[in-house]
Amino acid sequence: MIKFIFLPFLLTFLIFFLFFLWASYPWSLHEKKISPEVYSLGIDPSVNIEENPSVLKILTYNLSFLYGKGSEGPLYEKRGKEFYEEQLKKASEEIKEWDADIVCLQEVDFSGDRSHDLNQAHLIAKNSNYPFVAEAPSWVSNYIPFPYWPIKNHFGRIKSGGAILSKYPLSLHEVTLFSKPASKPWWYNLFYLHRYVQKVTVTVGDQIFNILNVHLEAFDKTDRQKQIKLLLSKIQKENPHFVAGDFNMVPTIATKKSKFFNEDNYEFDTSFEDMKTSGFLEVIPEEIYQKDEGLYFTFPAWAPDRRLDYIWYKKDLKMMKAEVLPSALSDHLPLKASFQISGPNFNPYSQ
């Protein structure tokens, strides 16, 4: 009799366990390196580019899979395919207008239930005339049971991460997926995204530039500080020209570091100071930032109160201009910077 009573519980546990294994596949907890392919989208590379430009424009933008306010969970409700198609159209128009040569994206969906299997990186690239795309999948799972309730809002199957769009040819693509937070249990981390650093080489005319696109930990400052140290090691090894992305840190001199709407706390976080030891410069110098912080806040997009997004560059490069751009498509605002990489191609006063 006891055997028959116990059997339903055993079957229930077995079904749950098998579902857990299937949902969290491919299982991944620790650091690993991958080398995804670089896509050439069949767009004429000569469209709107100079063969040997004197200026190189870099843009970093956390898309938050183009959901906007509520993407982080509590206010999230599943939306239809038409919503994402319209968001993609607007994002393509904005990115085309901003006219960057290299676009570093974070939190972009390649496929998945929540955004109706639309490859956001490829569609934006095609619609904005970017011939080359490098994907960095950092969150791949058969089923994400989040937000937890109601079940109808679960993200479900997902493939998401970072991407680099380029007007110039890309090569030597490599992605380092960082270990997941040690402060979280293993079963939680099986469903959690990897933070990452994406490396790619861009050939611009007769010059070559190495670019790192990063997305660092948002909710655990100890883990983020570890990732910064790993990033510093990679910078020393790879010798990049630019490091751009969502660092999820605030400048050391930021006047507000806690008591934000989402309870984020950056007190005693050394990430920014650690990053400065790289010897790289940031496109918005601290003395400029300090004069009017609000001009450079990038999060949240609807009421910015902090800066999380950065573009760092080698000291021997000449930075010309940097600006935070307006947009209402994500929970982050994009940051763009222009660099002089050679002398002007002609002297307008020589004739």
Image (cartoon, rainbow, N blue to C red):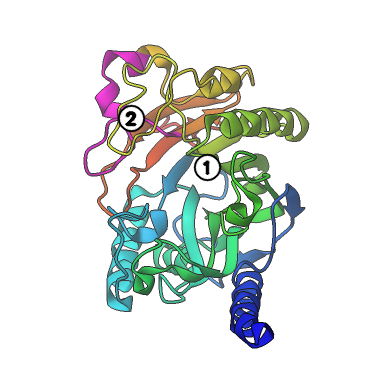
For the N terminus, the image quarter is: bottom right
- The amino acid marked with disc number 2 is Arg
Image disc number at residue 300: none
For the C terminus, the image quarter is: top left
Residue drawn at x 67%, y 34% is: 240
Q: Disc 2 on helix, strand or loop?
A: loop
In the rendered structure, which disc, 1 or 2, sits on the residue that comes first in sequence?
1
The image shows a total of numbered marks equal to: 2
Residue named by callout 2:
306
Q: Nearer the viewer, residue 344 or 176?
A: 176
Residue drawn at x 35%, y 55% is: 71
Q: Nearer the viewer, residue 156 or 165?
A: 156
In the rendered image, residue 226, in percent from the top left (x then y), is placed at 65, 30
Please, is residue 168 above or below residue 280 in the view?
below
Please, is residue 280 above or below residue 200 in the view?
above
In the rendered image, residue 78, in percent from the top left (x then y), is placed at 32, 70
- The amino acid marked with disc number 1 is Pro
Q: Is residue 307 magenta?
A: yes
Q: Callout 1 environment at 10 Å: few (<14), some (14 to 19), or many (20+)?
A: some
Residue drawn at x 32%, y 48% is: 331
Residue named by callout 1:
53
